[in-house]
């Protein structure tokens, strides 16, 4: 771990580069930009002390998805994948902080995605024609539609199998067997668990058991779900239902993470990868949806 100082307006790394480090801000602020220095430059966010940036390149070995610039003199700790391993043995709270930050970005992006979806659904209504400021905000994503096209559809489970083989999927905590139709959790429930599927499958629904019931996805062996309950104690946003008999699930709480790392470090990397993968794919969907909405208007 090295502390680095960046001058005002200094580029820390650029979109499209590969990297093997990420950063924790100690002093100052950093701006996150798409197409930095180009005519269609867009600022996505400001990062402040205590926050991390660049972690996606470490967790997923993926090119930098944005350019990061020091907005003022910036002090940041430069971290590597090996430092993540050190955190689990010596400073597990820092890993939890990273997971929580990923979850917070997922939460905010999900709200933005739902807002755009609602706008598209309502755009034929008379009042939708008056939402000019919102429409202008969506149109800026025309500049980043190419970014969505560059994102891979490969899942974190695929990558884990390729990198580690089946060892990455081994259970560390007790597992439980379920039959088809059993409900793991309901939309609106409070829960502190996330789950890994060791065999079988789980279907995820919104408005389960009502006339508006919609199945969002079906998850299979090695997939994780319910992570927002673990990192932030959010109420469940959907209902998880076992889809086939003899489905085997491992339930994981925040306090289990250190034990997981000690017994099977690869599983922690899978969990971080799962969060990063969800964020990356939702980002792609969001940009694509914004561009569609803007193009049609």
Image (cartoon, rainbow, N blue to C red):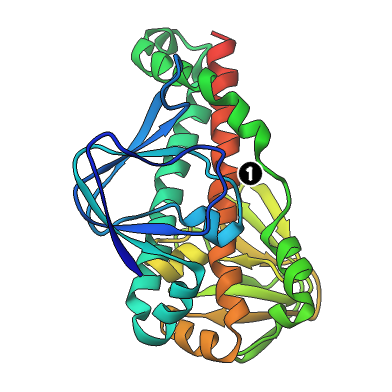
Residue 237 visible in the snapshot: no
Residue at 60% x, 19% y is 292
Residue at 55% x, 43% y is 17
Residue at 47% x, 82% y is 257
26 shown above or below 259: above
Q: Is residue 60 left or right of residue 127?
A: right
Residue 107 visible in the snapshot: yes
Nearer to us in this view, 156 or 194: 156
Location of the N terminus by quadrant is bottom left
Nearer to us in this view, 57 or 155: 57
The quadrant in which residue 138 appears is: top left
Instruction: Mark 1: give few (<14), some (14-19) or many (20+) Cα within 10 Å.
Output: few
Q: Is residue 197 left or right of residue 60?
A: right
**Residue at the spot of label 1:** 211
254 shown above or below 146: below
SS state under label 1:
loop
Residue 258 drawn at (x, y percent): 45, 86
Residue at 74% x, 69% y is 163
The quadrant in which residue 2 appears is: bottom left
Residue 52 drawn at (x, y percent): 35, 56
Residue 49 drawn at (x, y percent): 22, 55
| Total marks in image | 1
Q: Is residue 197 left or right of residue 187?
A: right
77 shown above or below 47: below
Residue 175 drawn at (x, y percent): 65, 88
Q: Is residue 296 left or right of residue 222?
A: left
């Amino acid at each position: 771990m090295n502390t680095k100082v960046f001058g005002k307006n200094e580029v820390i790394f650029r979109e499209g580069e590969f990297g093997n480090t990420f950063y924790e801000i100690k002093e100052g602020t950093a701006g996150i930009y798409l197409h930095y220095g180009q005519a269609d430059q867009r600022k996505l966010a400001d990062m402040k002390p205590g926050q991390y940036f660049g972690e996606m390149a470490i967790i997923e070995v993926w090119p930098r998805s944005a350019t990061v610039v020091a907005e003022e003199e910036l002090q940041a700790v430069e971290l590597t994948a090996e430092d993540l391993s050190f955190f689990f043995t010596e400073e597990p709270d820092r890993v939890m902080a990273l997971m929580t930050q990923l979850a917070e970005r997922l939460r905010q992006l999900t709200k933005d995605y739902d807002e755009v979806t609602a706008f598209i659904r309502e755009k034929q209504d008379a009042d939708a024609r008056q939402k000019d400021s919102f429409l202008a905000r969506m149109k800026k994503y025309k500049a980043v539609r190419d970014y969505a096209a560059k994102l891979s559809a490969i899942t974190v489970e695929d990558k884990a199998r390729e990198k580690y083989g089946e060892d990455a999927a081994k259970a560390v905590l007790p597992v439980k067997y379920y039959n088809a139709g059993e409900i793991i959790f309901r939309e609106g429930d409070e829960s502190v668990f996330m789950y890994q599927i060791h065999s079988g499958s789980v279907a995820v629904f919104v408005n389960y058991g009502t006339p508006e019931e919609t199945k969002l996805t079906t998850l299979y062996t090695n997939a994780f779900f319910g992570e927002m309950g673990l990192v932030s104690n959010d109420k469940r946003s959907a209902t998880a239902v076992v889809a086939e008999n003899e489905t085997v699930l491992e339930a994981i709480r925040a306090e289990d993470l250190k034990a997981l790392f000690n017994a099977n470090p690869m599983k922690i990397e899978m969990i971080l990868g799962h969060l990063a993968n969800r964020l990356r794919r939702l980002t792609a969907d969001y940009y694509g949806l914004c561009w569609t909405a803007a193009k049609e208007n």
